[in-house]
Image (spheres, grey):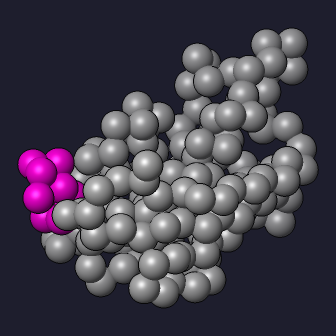
Amino acid sequence: MSRADQTLRAALDAGDHTAVVQAIPYARYLGLSVETEAAARFYRLPFRHDLIGNARKGALHGGTVAGLLELAMQLEVLIVEAQLRLPYPVDFSIDYWRSAAARDCLCRCRLIRSGRRIAQVQAECWQDDAERPIAFARADFLLRAVDESGPD
């Protein structure tokens, strides 16, 4: 097990979601955070000006929104799973419903199925009002033990 895998395992065992996010470079770069409210888990992407994709509209880049959704779904698998199996995306689809304004984005995920080798997850993203989502996503992840080689 690599040092990064050991760090991730220790963070998951301790239930330290901040450390789990910090163990993933892109999640750390985006500044993602995991929040819990009334037994529900949310993932927050704090707004930064360098994430703007359309300067005229002041809208976040669509790739940033997609990155938030994919990372949140991977984090959800890691947090929910009892053992460390790294989720490698094999299928990802996203539906954009509206532009993401220059504000924080929130995401909630639902683990649909987690089997021996595959996990399926859905996620929705919103800003000010959960009833007005900006994007929905669905992904299938191949689950690999940390001692297995990554995808070819």
Quadrant of the rendering where the N terminus is positioned: bottom left
149 lies above or below 68: below
Q: Can residue 72 be spotted in the picture?
A: no
- Residue pushed farthest front? 152
Residue 69 vs residue 37: left or right?
A: right
112 lies above or below 43: below
Q: Which is more toward the observer, 113 or 130?
A: 113
Q: Residue at x 89, y 44 (%)?
A: 98
x then y, percent, for residue 105:
64, 46
Residue 150 vs residue 125: left or right?
A: left
Q: Residue at x 68, y 56 (%)?
A: 92
- Residue pushed farthest top? 56
Q: Which residues are magenta?
A: 1-11
Quarter of the image for residue 61 reads: top right
x then y, percent, for residue 111:
57, 79
Quarter of the image for residue 83 reads: bottom left
x then y, percent, for residue 47:
58, 32
Q: Residue at x 85, y 58 (%)?
A: 132
- Asked if residue 147 is among those painted magenta in the image, a careful observer would answer no
Q: Which is more toward the observer, 49 or 69?
A: 69
Residue 13 vs residue 90: left or right?
A: left
Main secondary structure type of the part rendered in magenta = helix
- Asked if residue 2 is among those painted magenta in the image, a careful observer would answer yes
Q: Residue at x 72, y 49 (%)?
A: 127
Q: Can residue 24 be spotted in the picture?
A: yes
Quarter of the image for residue 5 reads: bottom left
| Count of all numbered marks drawn on residues in the image | 0
x then y, percent, for residue 40:
52, 77
